[in-house]
């Protein structure tokens, strides 16, 4: 059987210039390829080699088709502020940006002043079209940011600490004075979730339909909003918690504690998956990059750190304090403290963030929350005097996928999407640090040591087998009864030999362990952990 060669663009046998393909088109094709091509030359099975060659060719053709269609499917391109000479981007003010953009973009720059009801916390829907604002003194408002319309506002007449959208803009949850409440888009109270208690922070896991909350004492709750079942209820035991975020890559919940520790949780484990000592003081803010591999933390000791979650190492440490942080879809990082917002960006591609933009609110405004609007170059700011919206060029994804988030969806599309998402709801057990393990083959466990009874039974079976061996009769006195008995004794000894060797090895190991324990017991209890660990052979 002749094996067909894989797509040339995937295995890069011919340079793009010789194929008549421009470098720009070649880069677009590489963007849509599914990793490196399979090394077909190392395979011996001709049938498998042929199947993989056909599949590689299909991958190459689909990447080429996607690259050609990108011109129509992704017509918009993102861009950042560009300056000339010695000018700096962070010196450009919002007034100068408003004078250069179109009318529709200038409408996204506004301030809503409500001094009696703040400070305000904000949350945006997945499509970025709808926003819910919650004032500390009980004011809840639902807004359509595309048409700049107020859908509904009402007063709950008690403290509101946090607010979050659920699976769409029709439902949202508010952490109030005593309990967590669920409301519809017309202001109707649907549920009172008393199990959560006085929650300080709320998050929602879209793929699992789990509402997550944590209170000031560090008690974490996971509740399934489709069935009402409390999936997880854990005490973190790491102190007061003022920061909580969900990693968009694996849906693991990260909690920042007063001791400087960041712990990561899933709803099916009573112990944290990861505990990281990130700061010497309390953790004040957390944020995750959209790729899930980069985490930003801010501590009370006035340091902002960027962490690589694949190796759990610090990538960058910069001075500064942040009460709230948020990553944009394109990787910009917004940090805010007091009345000043700073935008950091990675423009070199080396994950070294530098200053990109800055914005000062009116004197006396205390910023509570910053959130980037998805698919828009807009940053929403909730503060003590209301909320504001400023323009951050290059922060949003310029092209949206209607299957993921559609800002223009109709009522029928929204209902169909809700049914589809309920059918595709993932169980809580699928939340893990590395979600790529789902669907892979579980590695075999290390073989357990047999018990004493099992070893004795194996030894007896081997001895019985050696005794039952029949020897061939030979002439010239070689089959005498004495010689046959001697051969049987040798066979029995050879059968017992591996069992006796294993028994001697186990006895030596237990003797070394007992000796090591005696040495540790001679030390004071406070010093036993410093005792030298003797490796066992």
Image (cartoon, rainbow, N blue to C red):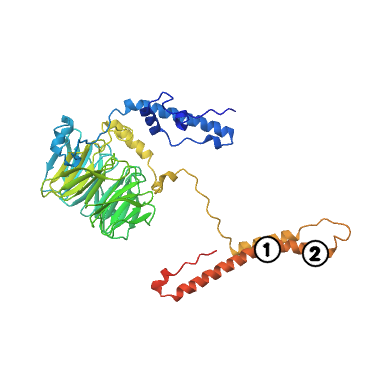
The reply to whether residue 343 is visible in this rendering is: yes
Q: Which mark is residue 485?
A: 2
Q: Residue 34, position in %: x, y?
A: 43, 35
Residue that numbered label 1 is attached to: 497
Please tell me whether mark 2 or mark 1 is closer to you in this view.
Answer: 1
Image quadrant containing the N terminus: top right
Q: Residues within 10 Å of mark 2 (few under 14, many from 20)?
A: few
Residue 156 in view here? no
Residue drawn at (37%, 30%), measured in percent from left and top?
28
Q: Is residue 442 above or below residue 460?
A: above
In the rendered structure, the answer to whether residue 50 lies left or right of residue 210 reads: right
**536 left or right of 111?**
right
Neighbour tally class for label 1: few under 14, some 14-19, many 20 plus, Cα within 10 Å: few
Q: Position of residue 33 (x, y in %)?
A: 42, 33
Q: Nearer the viewer, residue 428 or 84?
A: 84
Secondary structure of the residue carrying tag 1 is helix
Q: Position of residue 225 (x, y in %)?
A: 32, 46
Whether residues under marks 2 and 1 lie with C-beta atoms below 8 angstroms apart, the answer is: no
**At 58% across and 33% down in the image, what residue appears?**
46
Front residue of this view, candidates 367 and 386? 367
Residue furthest to the top: 20
Mark 2 or mark 1, which has the lower sequence index? 2
For the residues marked 2 and 1, what is the alpha-carbon distance in whole angstroms? 18 Å
Q: Residue 279's quadrant in the figure?
A: bottom left
- Nearer to the camera, 478 or 435: 478
Quarter the C terminus occupies: bottom right
Measured as percent of width and height from the top left, residue 412 is found at 29, 31
Q: How many marks?
A: 2
| Label 2 SS | helix
Compared to residue 147, the image places residue 178 above or below, namely below
Q: Which mark is residue 371?
A: none
């Amino acid at each position: 059987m002749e094996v067909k060669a894989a797509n040339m663009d995937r295995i890069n046998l011919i340079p793009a210039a010789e194929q008549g393909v421009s470098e720009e088109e070649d880069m677009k094709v590489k963007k849509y390829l599914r990793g490196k091509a399979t090394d077909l030359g190392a395979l011996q099975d001709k049938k498998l080699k042929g199947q993989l060659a056909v599949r590689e060719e299909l991958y190459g053709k689909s990447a080429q088709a996607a690259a050609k269609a990108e011109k129509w499917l992704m017509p918009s391109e993102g861009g950042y502020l560009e300056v000339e000479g010695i000018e700096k981007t962070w010196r450009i003010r919002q007034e100068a940006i408003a004078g250069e953009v179109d009318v529709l973009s200038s409408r996204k720059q506004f301030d809503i002043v409500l001094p009696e009801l703040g400070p305000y916390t904000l949350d945006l829907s997945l499509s970025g079209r709808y926003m819910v604002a919650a004032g500390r003194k009980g004011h809840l408002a639902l807004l359509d940011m595309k048409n700049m319309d107020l859908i509904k506002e009402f007063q709950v007449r008690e403290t509101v600490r946090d607010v979050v959208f659920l699976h769409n803009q029709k439902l949202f949850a508010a952490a109030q004075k005593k309990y967590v409440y669920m409301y519809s888009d017309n202001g109707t109270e649907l549920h009172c979730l008393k199990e959560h208690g006085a929650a300080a922070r709320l998050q929602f896991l879209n793929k699992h339909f789990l509402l997550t909350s944590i209170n000031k004492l560090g008690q974490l709750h996971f509740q399934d909003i489709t069935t009402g079942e409390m999936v997880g209820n854990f005490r973190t035991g790491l102190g007061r918690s003022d920061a909580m975020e969900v990693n968009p890559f694996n849906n693991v919940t990260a909690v920042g504690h007063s001791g400087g520790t960041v712990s990561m949780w899933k709803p099916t484990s009573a112990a944290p998956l990861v505990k990281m000592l990130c700061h010497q003081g309390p953790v004040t803010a957390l944020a995750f990059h959209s790729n899930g591999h980069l985490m930003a933390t801010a501590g009370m000791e006035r340091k902002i750190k960027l962490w690589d979650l694949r190796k759990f190492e610090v990538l960058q440490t910069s001075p500064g304090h942040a009460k709230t942080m948020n990553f944009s879809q394109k990787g910009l990082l917004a940090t805010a403290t007091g009345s000043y917002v700073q935008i950091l960006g990675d423009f070199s591609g080396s994950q070294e963030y530098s200053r990109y933009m800055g914005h000062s609110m009116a004197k006396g405004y205390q910023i509570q929350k910053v959130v980037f609007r998805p698919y828009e170059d807009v940053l929403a700011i909730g503060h003590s005097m209301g909320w504001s919206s400023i323009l951050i060029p290059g922060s949003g994804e310029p092209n949206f996928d209607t299957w993921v988030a559609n800002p223009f969806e109709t009522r029928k599309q929204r209902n169909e999407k809700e049914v589809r998402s309920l059918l595709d709801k993932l169980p809580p057990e699928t939340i893990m640090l590395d979600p790529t393990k789902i669907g892979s083959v579980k590695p075999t466990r290390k073989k357990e040591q047999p018990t004493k009874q099992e070893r004795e039974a194996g030894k007896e079976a081997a001895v019985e087998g050696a005794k039952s061996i029949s020897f061939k009769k030979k002439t010239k006195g070689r089959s005498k009864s004495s010689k046959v008995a001697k051969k049987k004794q040798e066979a029995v000894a050879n059968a017992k030999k591996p069992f006796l060797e294993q028994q001697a090895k186990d006895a030596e190991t237990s003797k070394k362990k007992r000796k090591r324990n005696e040495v540790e017991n001679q030390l004071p209890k406070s010093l036993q952990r410093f005792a030298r660990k003797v490796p066992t052979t």
